[in-house]
Image: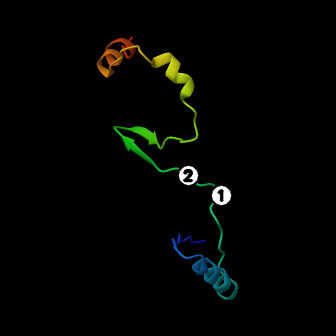
Amino acid sequence: MAEVTIKYKNKKTLEALKDLSKHLDFVVSAPDEVVPPTFKINGVTILKGDQSIDLTGLEKIFSNKKLSARDLRAKGWQRT
């Protein structure tokens, strides 16, 4: 069975499609799950961050440590 995705702005459009589906023998279904957009950089999949995560606990760990990206790369990401 062929599948088509239709994007619409107006809720009336959805209602019209549902009405047409009764007469033209096709099915209107909502996606099971909203998948966050992903993209790849050099083969690494990047996911969009979740805004609901509470990061206040990390503030105590990293505040006043005077860390820089250069120091983290030099000390934390050593190949073994």
- Figure coloring: rainbow
* Image quadrant in which the C terminus is located: top left
Q: Position of residue 59 (x, y in %)?
A: 50, 23
**Residue occupying the point 65% across, 73% down:** 28
Query: Alpha-carbon neighbours of circle 1 within 10 Å: few (<14), some, or many (≥20)?
Result: few
Q: Is residue 10 above or below residue 50?
A: below
Q: Position of residue 21 (x, y in %)?
A: 66, 82
Residue for point 60% across, 76% down? 11
Three-letter code for the amino acid on which mark 2 is drawn: Val
Residue lying at 41% horizontally and 15% vertically, measured from the top left = 64
- Left or right? Give the position of 36 relative to 71: right
**Badge 2 density bin: few <14, some 14–19, many ≥20, Cα 10 Å:** few
Reading the image, the residue beneath label 2 is 35
Picture quadrant where residue 46 is located: top left
Left or right: 51, with 67 as reference point: right
Q: Secondary structure at mark 2?
A: loop
User: Which disc, if any, is residue 32?
Assistant: 1
